[in-house]
Every structure is written in C-alpha cells, then in structure tokens.
C-alpha cells in the first residue's frame, strides 16, 4: 500500500512541472507576436489582453499556472504538509488571485480605473505577496532547500519592488516607466521558485520510493 501511495505522490511533481511548462508557451508567444505593439519594459503582462487572441492565451497561462500550483500543494500534502495551516492558505490565495485576475481584466493604459480593473489590481497584489511568503514558510518548516529559500527571499524582494513601482500609477495615473520590466523579473523569480519546489518534491519522492522498495 505504501508503495502505491508513493507512486501516486511521484506523479504529482512531474504533473506540476508539466502544467508550469504549459503555462509558459502562450505568454512567450504573446511576447514574440506583439513585439513593437506591447513594450515589455513599460507594459504589464496583463496588457496582452489587448492584442489579437491575447485574452484566451493569457487565460491559458494564468489558469495553467494556478493549476500547477495547486498540484504542487497536493504533492506537499502527500509528503506530510498539514492540510490546515498558513502555507495552504497562502498557496490558495496565490492560485485564487491568478484566477480572479483572469476573470477581471485590467484597464487600458492611460484610462480611468474601472471596477474590474481595480479587482484585477488587488488580485495581483494578493498574488505577489502570498507566494513569496508561502515559499519562505515551506523552506523554513518543510523543505530545507537552500535554492527554495533563496528564491523565496528573492521573490519577496522583487515583489516589494514591483508593488512599489505601482506608486506613480496609483497617485499620478501616468504609469511607471519600468512597471512591465519589474513585473517580468518578478514572474521569472516566482517561476523559479515553483520549479525549485517541484524539483525538491521530485527528489524527495524518488528517495522515499527507493527506501520503501529497498
């Protein structure tokens, strides 16, 4: 029975990785296809909804990323993480934030903030605070991985800088020159954190399975 459970757990980390990789294809395509139309320096990733097929492709990215994160959480449960606790709440908030931000689109640059646009912005704030905190807690309490811990710290710092870059937008409405670049750096670090978590779980599952079958 333990061997069967171990094999089931072993499937989750690769499944999470597959979902994370899938989420990358649409957003990479949008960056290439919209070159010259959307600036990766000043426009946020959410602005890709304003290019052809952008809404659907961006939804695939966000929902695949959310799904991969949930699968990672389930894998953590299988490895012994308590189902009730701050880590579960934080990963849930990250995944829910991605979903809400998909359902409530951003506003075009330079236009007044609408209700959907405000919801989108606050959902983003929840996302970018939740996952770095979850990563820090996981690295301290559950997975003693230097890579996970360093990426969690890096994501926390880049998240703070990205949220700080919104201040000109909030108070002046003129946008921030480096807003898009800051967000892309943040997402790169967050992806690194998620892949590092998946890799740590993958290694742990392989080691556990080897010990059980030995």
Image (tube, rainbow, N blue to C red):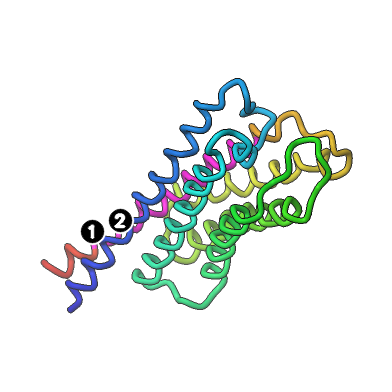
Magenta stretch, residue numbers: 182-207
Q: Residue 168's spot in the image, x, y percent?
A: 83, 38
Position of the C terminus by quadrant: bottom left
Considering every residue shown, the one lying at the far left of the view is 214
User: What x and y, as percent, mark residue 120?
Assistant: 69, 53
Q: Does the image show residue 150? A: no
Mark 2–mark 1 contact, CB under 8 Å? yes
Q: Would residue 93 appear left or right of 65 to someone viewing this image?
A: right
Residue placed furthest toward the right: 172
Residue at 40% across, 62% down = 71
Label at residue 206: 1
Image point 57% across, 44% down: which residue?
A: 154
Q: Nearer the viewer, residue 62 or 75?
A: 62
**Residue 110 got which mark?**
none
- Quadrant location of the N terminus in the rendered image: bottom left
Q: Considering the numbered disc 2 on the image, is that residue within a helix, a strand or a loop? A: helix
Indicate the secondary structure of the residue bearing disc 1: helix
Q: Quadrant of residue 111?
A: top right
Q: Which residue is nearer to you in this view: 61 or 203?
A: 61
Residue under label 2: 202
At x 23%, y 73%, the residue is: 5
């Amino acid at each position: 029975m333990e061997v069967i459970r171990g094999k089931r757990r072993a499937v989750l980390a690769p499944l999470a990785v597959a979902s994370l990789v899938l989420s990358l294809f649409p957003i990479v395509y949008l960056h290439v296809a919209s070159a010259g139309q959307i600036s990766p320096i000043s426009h946020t990733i959410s602005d890709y909804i304003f290019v052809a097929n952008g809404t659907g492709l961006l939804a695939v990215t966000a929902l695949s990323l959310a799904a991969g994160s949930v699968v990672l959480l389930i894998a953590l449960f299988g490895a012994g993480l308590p189902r009730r606790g701050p880590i579960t709440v934080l990963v849930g908030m990250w995944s829910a934030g991605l979903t809400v931000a998909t359902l409530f689109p951003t506003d075009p640059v330079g236009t007044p903030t609408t209700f959907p646009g405000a919801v989108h912005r606050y959902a983003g704030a929840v996302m970018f605070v939740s996952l770095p905190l979850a990563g820090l807690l996981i690295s301290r309490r559950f997975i003693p991985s230097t890579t996970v811990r360093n990426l969690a710290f890096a994501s926390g710092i880049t998240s703070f800088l990205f949220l700080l870059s919104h201040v000109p937008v909030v108070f002046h409405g003129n946008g921030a020159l480096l807003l898009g670049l800051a967000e892309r750096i943040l997402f790169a670090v967050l992806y690194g954190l998620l892949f590092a978590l998946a890799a740590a779980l993958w290694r742990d599952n392989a080691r556990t399975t080897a010990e059980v079958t030995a």
